[in-house]
Image: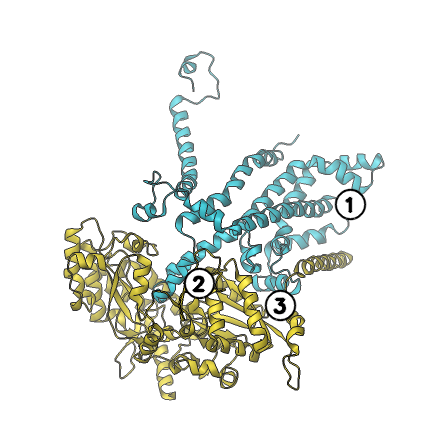
Chain colours: A cyan, B yellow
Amino acid sequence: MNPTAKRTKLRDIHRLPFGWNALLHLIAGGFALSCLFPFALAIVISFTDENTLALNGYSIFPEKWSMFAYDYIFRTGDQLLHSYLVTLSVTAIGTLLTVALTALYAYALSRKAFKYRKGFTFLAFFTMLFGGGLVPSYIIVAQMLHLKDTIWALILPMALNAFNIVILRTFFQTMIPDAIVESGKIDGAGEYKILFRLVLPLALPGLATIALFSTLGFWNDWFNALLYIDSNRMVPLQAMLMRIESSMQFIIQNSSILNSGESREMLASLPQETSRMAMVVLATGPIVLAYPFFQRYFVEGLTIGAVKD
Amino acid sequence: MKKGWMGTTAVLLTASLLAAGCGSKGNEEKPSASANGSQGASPSASASGSAKTEENVNLVWYTIGTPPKDLKKVNDAVNDYIKDKIHATVEMKLLDWGDYSQKMQIIIASGEPYDIAFTSSWANDYFGNAKKGAFYELDGLLEKEGKGAKEALNPAFLEGTKVNGHNYGLPTNKELPQQRVFRFNKTLVDKYKLDLSQVKTIQDLEPLLKTVKENEPGLNPIPGKIAEFLPFDLPINDLPFIGVPLDTKEYKLINVWDTPEAMSYLETVHKYYQAGYFPKDVATQTDAGDYFKTGKWLVDVADAQPYADNLWSNDAGYGVVSVPMQDPITFNWSVAGSLQAINAKSKHPEKAMEFLNLLYTDANLVNLIDFGIEGVHYKKTGEQSKDAIPDSGYGFPAFTTGNMMLTYLNTNDPADKWEKFKEFNDSATSAPLLGFQADTSSITTEIANLKNAKDSTYNALFSGTIDPKDNLPKVNKKLKDSGLDKVMAELQKQIDAWRASK
């Protein structure tokens, strides 16, 4: 990078020629920028004056800035606060539950001594290939278990996932040598002690990977809320954003069929453009900040199985 | 292996038991399904002195609209009000615009208990659901519990929403026909002294557009896509190229896009596009009317109702005037613009109808549901008028339910607004296919193909972006290849049978 370094005799053999280096950086940088740009634009729009937006359209340097959108949201919107609470608790409880259930199930499957292992593996694997479909799942969740409008409707349908089980089972099988389990047995440890004191600490990267998957899954899930949540108090963040978005879409699509008097009434019930962007910013902010924290484990989890001794 | 399966089943059973336990715990606080309804019976039970003591039932009511913050508060007020009148309470469940159809589809398919639901030609498909048997047949109820509603409605509403000769939904009492109008920005009309008296068709707009474009080069006189008006009645709304002429005698279906009317309309629009009267990107625009706020427009197309100009002017903050393109005509879809239906599996269809009936006869209840609680969500400004209190946390789409003619007016609405609505409804003529519903079950593939063929060029063509001279014949050929003739023949057969039965 340093121009003088290029001339030194002791060249690092991994170093690329300057031109290539610059080009690759440019490509990667450009790609990163194109990923970041929409978010930056959303932030700018959320701080733009509503009338300026209508007159000039989207611009990264608006003529007139305004805090109105945030003011409006915090004034009228305990909805946002509710949704935050719902999303946070769903994510926290859901992630813990997912990791616990997945780890227990996967560990049992990974032990060769477990007699019914084939049957249980098949049971999990079967759900990867075939699902019951939308209406039967709805009947089970809403009418048999009566989970409608409860936090469990957002957690339980996603709590145990066959794909995660398979990943973690493979992880246990390859990363935890049987010898470790045997050594525990020789030293007189019971099954629980072996699991909690020996196996799980060694499997931490694998567990973190599952935790990351499910955190993102729970945080971003809106479909379960669409199905099972009617009450405003239980709507999670993403579902709230999704509602606004799909309602917008719906009204625009139908505006020609509907009498203008009516689509007027509908539009009036939706937040304005800047307020919508402000909601996007407030809703996505935290997870963006949480990501780097998890990323460390994520990379570790992915690479740790790559090299075997 | 055999033992393994038994173990599996045992675990599954335990898990579902556990989950059920958690679920019911979370549910306890709320009155959920109609099963809980009977609990609140005690206070009013004494009121009914009739032979059999009526028990309070709880009606579950799904309707469309963004759920407002104070829904619970208003719902409680509604229950306080109706409890003694009909010995029932209602649980209002508002589902957001975009979610409504999908959610109702699942609710109906899964047989989830509910009593009343919003339905229409554009959300939670009324005709489809009625044919499937999802809704309760109202004919009997309308003679007894629903008498008041029946009297309040223009007979054309019930006539036009019949499916196989029966009513399955109670239409909102609002404007009945459709009247498409050109809507003008009065500021510009006054500024350039434009003469609107000569305007009737899209062709007549040309001199006006020209004047404005010459004087205000930075402005697109027509700010977005405009809805076309071609004098045809369509048996299937999604397929705007199959229709009969509005003044038809022989009810023969033709390809609308193959008529000189369509060609001349499209040529005009294309000419306007080339002259720069439309925005360049009009075909792909997804704007929901921002130009209304900025005032940078001259003319667009809308559907009118009496005193619509006042509404629009209020919204815009400047004058908006309109010129009708047609006389008011009642179409199938305009009649079925908004209905409330009763679940075919409802346990209390009579109670549900009693509640719906109140919505057509009891002004206090309608205003409570539409506008909220007086003094909290709106202020009364006169005998029949009110002003909404901004950001007060309640809003409800009034057009989705009940008798709109009973609702309070806005302070600056003319006092005879609802009389004008009645006149407007009475003045309407019926479209030729009013009351006809196509049965598409035997031609679903062709219809899907035709829809695809339409969608690929519709926007480009009707926004004037491409030249109809070359493209319209191509589109028509594509429609023919996608099975247009088969669909037309089938629909024609149905229409003939329908006419013979009348």
Q: Which residue is mark 1?
A: A113
> Between marks 1 and 3, how big is the CA–CA gap?
48 Å
Which one is in front in this view, the residue at disc 1 or the one at disc 3? 3
Q: Nearer the viewer, residue A230 or B261?
A: A230
| Label disc, if present, on residue B379 of the rendered structure | 2
Q: Secondary structure at mark 3?
A: loop
Observer able to see residue B124? no
Q: Nearer the viewer, residue B362 or A155?
A: B362
Quadrant in the picture for the C terminus of chain B: bottom left
Label 1 chain ID: A
> Relative to B343, is B324 on the left or the right?
left
Q: Which residue is mark 3?
A: B33
Quadrant in the picture for the N terminus of chain B: bottom right
Residue B488 x/y as whole percent: 33, 75
Q: Secondary structure at mark 1?
A: loop
Q: Is residue A256 above or below residue B335?
A: above
Q: Is residue B231 above or below residue A286?
A: below
> Relative to A192, is A58 on the left or the right?
left
Q: Quadrant of residue B405?
A: bottom left
Q: Is residue A25 above or below residue B360?
A: above
Q: Amino acid at mark 2?
A: Lys
Circle 1 residues within 10 Å: few <14, some 14–19, many ≥20: few
Residue beneath the point at 43% across and 49% down? A276
